[in-house]
Amino acid sequence: MPRPLSDIFLYPRYSSAQDYKGRTGQEAPWDPRKRPKYWFDPKAPQSARRNVVYDLVLAISDTGTIIADLSGNPILEYLVITKEEAGSVNIPPANYSGEVQLEYPVPLRPLADNEVLVFGRLPGMVGNQVLVADKSELETGPDAFLRSDRALLKAIASKLGVEV
């Protein structure tokens, strides 16, 4: 069964300024001149370099869509930001009505040998998301289902009395 991308985030992602305050006890900083950032690297401020490089983040276009490779899977790329930006969040308050730039993607841990990023939908979620899937669960082809999808379909067919 695919898992949410958040399972491989290097740092916690805060959903809002209220979430940040609830989990850290601090007010979330907000500077509308900068890109929003819903995570922070606690070690970044101690870096001897001015910039911090994260090897794995989702590649996102200028319009905010996730970039896919030729086989339709999400692409990963580098993120280079200043150590000051990396070490703090930049979360708009709930009542902010101004224009907001694209947010910084959350750095990811390296994928395990059996993991791959795919687009899909988790139960109870709306729309496609980037998910972490086990390669052994994937089938290939243009109409491929996950093995867990096929097991679910077989269970439904069995309940309906349909032979497959």
Image (spheres, rainbow, N blue to C red):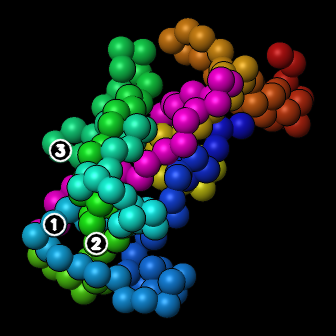
Does residue 107 belong to the magenta stretch?
Answer: yes
Query: Which quadrant holds the N terminus?
Result: top right
Classed neighbour count for the residue bearing mark 3: other residues with Cα under 10 Å, few (<14), some (14–19), many (≥20) = few
Q: Which residues are magenta?
A: 99-119
Label 1 or label 3, whichever comes before in sequence order: 1
Q: Residue at x 41, y 52 (%)?
A: 106
Q: Which residue is mark 2?
A: 90
Residue topped by disc 1: 34
The structure residue drawn at horizontal position 60% and vertical position 56%, both measured from the top left corner, is: 124
- How far across and how far down the image is residue 140, in percent? 60, 11
Q: Nearer the viewer, residue 155 or 116?
A: 116
Q: Which residue lies at the image location 38% right of the left edge and 29% below the top edge?
A: 75
Secondary element type, mark 1:
loop
Amino acid carrying mark 3 in the image: Thr
Pick whichever, 149 or 105, lies toward us. 105
Whole-percent x, y for residue 109 in the image? 54, 42
On screen, 29 above or below 13?
Answer: below
Q: Earlier in the sequence, mark 1 or mark 2?
A: 1
CA distance for labels 1 and 2:
8 Å
Asked if the residue at tag 2 contacts the one at tag 1, i.e. Cβ–Cβ closer than 8 Å, the answer is yes
Q: State the residue lying farthest toward the front.
A: 48
Tell me the SS state at disc 3.
loop
Q: Quadrant of residue 92?
A: bottom left
> In this rendering, which labeled residue sits more in front, label 1 or label 3?
1
CA–CA distance between discs 2 and 3?
A: 20 Å
Quarter of the rendering containing residue 89: bottom left
SS assignment at label 2: loop
> Is 32 on the left or on the right of 74, as rendered?
left
Instruction: Give the amino acid at mark 2.
Output: Asn
User: Which residue appears at 59% of the width and 37% of the height?
Assistant: 132
